[in-house]
Amino acid sequence: MEYAKKHMRRASLVLALLLLLPLTACGEKKPAGAKDGTTAVLDTSRPEESTAKAEEKLVLDKTDLDGAALRVLGTGESYGYGYYEVKDIWAAEDSAEAMESAVYRRALACEEKYNFKIDFRQSNSVRSDVSMQVSSSLDEEDLFFEGWGALFAMSKAGYMRDLQEIPTLDLSNEWWDQNANKDLTLGNRLFYTTGEMTTMDDQMTRYLYFNKNMVEDHHLADPYALVREGKWTLDRFGEMASAVTDDVNGDGVLNYEDTFGLFFELTSPQFFILGCGRKYVTLDADGYPQYTFLQDSEDYTVLERVAEVLSKPTVYNVNDYVDLGEYSNRFSYARSLFAAGRHLFTLGGADVITEFREMEDEFGILPLPKYKEEQKRYYHMIDTYTPLFAVPVTVADTGDLGYMMDYFSYEGMKTLTPVFRETLLERKYTRDADSAEMLKLIFDSKAYDLAVVADWANIVNIANASIDMGRVPKMSSYEKAATMMDRQIRADYEAICNLGK
């Protein structure tokens, strides 16, 4: 792989934006792929059946891309303790390891079918790399991966192209996440999204692991049955977590030596709040984020119940663990306690499932609970550090770029996703067919909330910080934040709308 000489500053960011950004006003187009592809109904179709349908849809206007390269920049091995490293874009050779083989075979299919190759490099400082390239007008990558939270700030700075302006890219195809396309559009402009180009969004979708032995030992209800019957609610979760909490050493104090329903980390509340169907903002027809949280009379009741369920003594705060032993961070240490039978539940994603391979007890997988049985669907959010992809504004020629991105992701749907979901998660790492069924539900019920990554008026941390301290968030805190939030939303919306003008 060869790249142009780096760190040459040849033009200003402003000039790059003026020359390269499309002059499209906000509100003039609808978000790409505006249909809602999420459902809580389990899809029983076979992978080969959906693939056959996709093959009939994928017709590229150009059949030979003349050996072009899709240049990709991914996050490196030290990004977020290594959990957020993008590993599934390119492999140098075939392998006996299933995922690496799938990555290799996908690249080979791109070369054989449409005659284009994959140039891939990694960086532990993607954001600064892209910033330097844009400010210097360097055309070095066709697309890059960076954490969801960082991408929001980068979009306002004008680092990326509106993906909807790439003429050969069809974002309505099923291998793109339609919920991400819809929910991440601001001012009807979409600068970053996700799909089956990579498995990172699947890996970082947060759900629950549970200890099946503890459920049996405490004579608790079958949680799989509760999910299928639509009865897996926040109250049922709280009852089960409370039932297992125990002063194991008998010292009269519940501490790190005892057994708990769940270990708590600072961001836990935001996943449970969304799981209860509560978003901080929703987008109107013009792509403007409307603050919708606490606008319903039941919203604060939901918040109070989430705070109650995620409080001591049922839940133990990860920050209270003192001796981490051989572990490099508190989170891995707390998960080791789950594996040792000290927690009934742990909140995590597929990225940590390998940590339970040696677990003696049987474990299973569950969606995050609904608030009430009447809630129509489940909701699951990716971690805010999850790398999504974007196209730098300095890409000079997007003529064939859309073709390469579409086919690369389409092949990901055919080759990569089945290996990750079925071969690895469902057959190698999980231990029952029920968990495979739950994973299908979870991955099909992803949702995104711009307020979580934009953090307008520190809105998300109001709940996180209060519940972290064992308190219910004050209604007055949200009332104070609402006015500030409205100003910040307006400023960001106008900044996005005015890019390129």
Image (cartoon, rainbow, N blue to C red):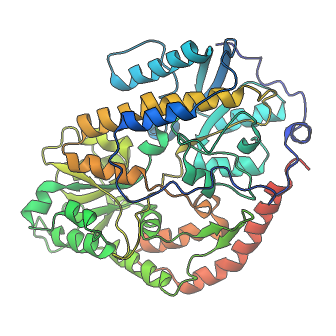
Which quarter of the figure has residue 423? top left
Residue positioned 69% across, 72% down in the render? 485
Residue positioned 73% across, 44% down in the render? 164
Look at the image and tell me whether residue 76 can be seen: no
From this viewpoint, which residue is outermost toward the front? 56
Q: Is residue 380 above or below residue 9?
A: below
Image quadrant for the N terminus? top right
Q: Is residue 477 above or below residue 166?
A: below
Q: Is residue 333 left or right of residue 307?
A: left
Q: Is residue 352 above or below residue 89?
A: below
Give 20 or 24, whichever is nearer the viewer: 24
Disc tally is: 0
Q: Is residue 132 left or right of residue 482?
A: right
Image x and y of residue 353, in percent: 30, 42
Give 175 or 497, whichever is nearer the viewer: 175
Image x and y of residue 86, in percent: 51, 33
Look at the image and tell me whether residue 320 can be seen: yes
Image x and y of residue 104, in percent: 46, 18
Image x and y of residue 367, in percent: 34, 59
Q: Is residue 23 above or below residue 423?
A: below
Residue positioned 35% across, 38% down in the render? 421
Give 410 or 214, whichever is nearer the viewer: 410
Which quarter of the figure has residue 8? top right
Give 246 or 121, whichever is nearer the viewer: 121
